[in-house]
Image (cartoon, rainbow, N blue to C red):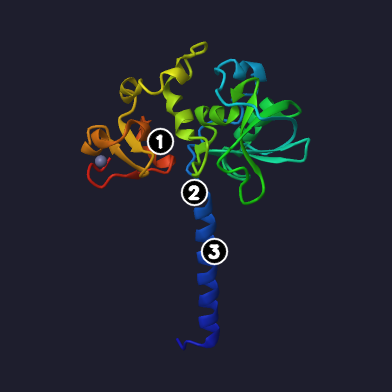
Amino acid sequence: MKITKKHIFSLLVILILAIGAISIASAYTGTGFSHNVPSSKYSDMSASDILSQYSDTECHVEERAVCTKVVDGDTIYLDNGEKVRFVGVNTPERGVEGYIASKNFVQKLCLNKEVGLDIDDSKHHDKYGRTLAVVIVDGKNVNEMLLKEGLAEIMYMPPSEFYPYNWADGNTHVADTHSSSSSSDSSSTDSSSSSGSGSYVGNANTGKFHVSSCSSVNKMSEKNKVFFSSRDEAINQGYVPCKRCNP
Ligand SMILES: [Zn+2]
């Protein structure tokens, strides 16, 4: 077969289409969510049902306004014209699995209600001009709730006043501690008890994770330890396996 310019041209077109398809596909797989919360999960629950499972946050309300629109699980509009990006967390974009569940959750808690904001003192706005804040409803930290419900992944972008790994830490004992106030005051001392629940330990500072017996875990500062119950959980939160212990 004689190779003509036409052949080369059509090969180029196929190549470009293939590259396009691959990059679109990877844009949707790289989000790092577990995607396992069914969109119907909260349909039979009222906002107060959900809120009653959480203890009051230590965050301070610096501003109050009514939420007029929920864009997705981490972005809302207020009646003062402000657009708010929930700091420290990231929920699925439109078209990605998990988008509906996280958006419904935030609508249920915030839409047409007065919400409080604790604005990030280290960085007031993101590059799109959205206010970076913890959103507080009935004294509860909604950013933290999104993480604990598995509706959001951690998105820690220093400098930030808030350290979202602290919100996710209580992940394993959230369901059965309705009225307990121990979650906030014992955070500095209870790391030994929480290490039992996770067989993998991540380092929030390096972004690597290890098996709990890896020598690196002993050297790690307590405040950087993040516990995972499975390898997938660590990967989903963006952690990279340690090369030495190969978790
Ligand atoms: Zn290791």
Residue 218 coordinates in the image, percent (x, y): 24, 33
Q: Quadrant of ligand 1?
A: top left
As rendered, which of 47 and 16 lies closer to the eye?
Answer: 47
- Please name which of the two marks, 3 or 1, marks the residue nearer to the observer: 1
Q: Mark 2 or mark 1: which comes first in sequence?
A: 2
Q: Amino acid at mark 2?
A: Thr
- Please rate how many residues cluster around mark 1, counting C-alpha atoms within 10 Å: few if below 14, some from 14 to 19, many from 20: some
Residue 167 coordinates in the image, percent (x, y): 48, 29
In the picture, measured across the screen, residue 242 lies left or right of residue 17, that is: left
- Which residue is identified by label 3? 20
- Which residue is identified by label 2? 29
Q: Are marks 2 and 1 in contact (CB under 8 Å)?
A: no
Residue 130 coordinates in the image, percent (x, y): 66, 45
Whether the residue under disc 2 has CB within 8 Å of ligand 1: no
Query: CA gap, disc 3 to disc 1?
Result: 29 Å
Q: Are marks 3 and 1 in contact (CB under 8 Å)?
A: no
Q: Amino acid at mark 3?
A: Gly
Q: Under tag 1, what secondary structure? A: helix
Query: CA gap, disc 2 to disc 1?
Result: 15 Å
Query: CA gap, disc 3 to disc 2?
Result: 15 Å
Whether the residue under disc 3 has CB within 8 Å of ligand 1: no
Instruction: Specify the quadrant of the image occupied by residue 76.
Output: top right
- Which residue is identified by label 1? 233
Residue 92 coordinates in the image, percent (x, y): 57, 41
**Residue at 45%, 18% in the rendered image:** 185
Q: Amino acid at mark 1?
A: Glu
> From where the camera sits, is residue 46 visible?
no
